[in-house]
Each structure stands twice: as C-alpha cells, then as structure tokens.
Image (spheres, helix red, strand yellow):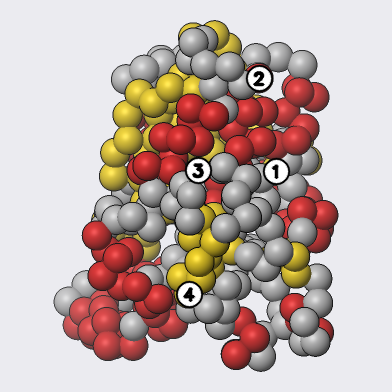
Amino acid sequence: MKSKGLARLKVVNCNLCKSKGVEVVYPATISKSGSTKFSYACTNDGHGEYYQIVRCKQCGLHFCSPRLNSSNLENEYSKLSDDIYQKELGGRIKTFQRNIVNISRYKKKGHLLDVGCSLGSFLSEAQKKEWIVEGIEPSSWCIKKAKELFNINIRQGTYKDLNKFGRKFDVITLWDVLEHLDDPLEALVKCREVLKDDGILVFSTVDIGSFYAKIMGKKWPWLMKMHIYYFDKKTIKEYLKKSGLSLIKIKKYKHTIGINYLLYKLKKINSLFYFLVKFIKKTIIFNKNIYITFGLGDFMEVYARKDFSLEV
C-alpha cells in the first residue's frame, strides 16, 4: 500500500482456525479519512475509523486484516497515555465494584491477576475486598499513574510475560482487553498456564453477533482501529476449547459511565443523541455528572475454568 499511514500493515490468517479464506465484511475507512495517527487509548473517539474487517469462511471469526504487526502494536501500547480514562475513573470504579461482586460467586479471595490493568483501578477495588493483587500493563504512563493514584505496583509487559510472575493465580481477569490483542488464542493459553487448577478466568469483550451490533452494521460504535478481533458467543466458545478451558457462563456485560463521558462519546457517534443528552444534563440534572449503567448486549462477560479433558 502506498499510503504512509498504512505502510506497516500486514495480511493475517484466521487466529482461531488458521484458515486463509476470508470474505470482506466492512472495507477499511482509515485510508478514506486520511488518518495516519494510530490512537489506541481505550477512551479515544475514533468511532467509525477501522481497518478492513473480514470474516473467516471456515469458523466465522471477524478480525482486521491487513493491520499492524505484533511488534508495532506493542510499541503503540507501551507509549499510550489516556487522560480521559483518568477523568472517568468514577465510572470505571463502579463497573469494577460490580465485577468483583460477580467474581465472588465463584471465588471469594486469593491471588488475583489483572492482565492489561491500565491505571489499576480494578486491582485497587479488589484489594479492598482482601484479594492479593498483581497486574501487568504495557503502558509506562499507566504504571506510573497506578502508583500515584492507588499505590499499586504493576509489572510492565504483555500476556507474553505472565510466566515472569513465578506463581499461579486463583483468578485472572482481562477487562475489555482480548479484542485489542494480536494473538488472543496465545493470550488465553498463557492465562491457562498461570491459572491454578481450580482457578477462574474472567474477561469481558465485544460481541459482534449481538442484535445491536447486527442492526447497526458498519455504524456499530465499536468498529474501531484499536479493536483487532470481533468475537461472538460461538467463536468465544471455540477459543476456550482450543486453549484448554471450559465455559462456566456467558452473560451480558454492563458498563457504568459518567454523563460527561457519555457526551464525549456521543459527540462522535450520534449528534442527535448528543444534543438531547446535553439538554437533559443542563435542564434536568443541573450539569451534574451523574453515573449511568447500561448494557446493550454487544459486550459479553465470560467465566471459564481449566478443562483437563482438553489438550492444549
């Protein structure tokens, strides 16, 4: 490709079944917009800007191809900073408090590892519930902020470095992380390797097979260049099987966000709703930053454990 912004892109096979056969679902929009800046902050407003999205003809997995290679992705995430995420910590904390309650139905306490832990707000909330916590995160900025905000020490690295902890964990979590990774299958295998035999793996991720995602089509807000893979319930179950894990439960994942953050997102996603919510904020709640919990079904929360009958 001739475009300077797309020069580092590579064509990839299906991560799940290794097939080369794909069909284009949504053509790339990045080149059309002329964008050459790659923003991978989870709060970025690049909705509608994405690499070409294809569907595997064999297993049905949706993913981006061509896209950045693994080393370039890791470099982008190591340099990442996200001031908006820090401003939205209130909503994140409320979401994570609910997550901890859900986890407690399976495990009450022990050693917990959060992969892609960002500023460490989930670890901070888990620690308050007497979990022994550790985290790993590629961004040096996030690691510094975690120490400043929560006095939590986080290891710099990726899922490839999980063996460096030198221990196994009762619970491993990945909150809205799996869709960002170059090799989600390897990531799940690595998680299994450091999970205790009776441990629980918990993660949230996008669901492109949801009703909302289907009716929105190419206008679905979570089609973004920071998202590399787009799972549905069928492909997630296959991922778990291939990584030696068995499904416990899949449920709808809910996010809690502040109305200020909602306005920030709506400004790019839907101008009509943006002005409606802005009007409500000004006239009804008198410019307070209230918190809203919502789940449209296009994110799923997955619980899994080791399956000793499956070979990895």
User: In what element is the residue under mark 4?
Assistant: strand
**Residue under circle 3?**
175
Discs 1, 4 touching: Cβ within 8 Å:
no
**Residue under circle 4?**
26
Mark in front: 1 vs 4: 4
Q: Quarter holding the N terminus?
A: bottom right
User: In what element is the residue under mark 1?
Assistant: strand
**Residue under circle 1?**
137
Which is nearer the N-term, disc 1 or disc 4? 4
Q: Which residue is painted at 74% across and 47% down in the image?
A: 138
Mark in front: 4 vs 2: 4
Q: Determine the CA span between mark 2 and mark 1.
A: 18 Å
- Relative placement, left or right, of 93 versus 275 is right
Mark in front: 2 vs 3: 2
**Residue under circle 2?**
193
Q: Determine the CA span between mark 4 and mark 2.
A: 35 Å
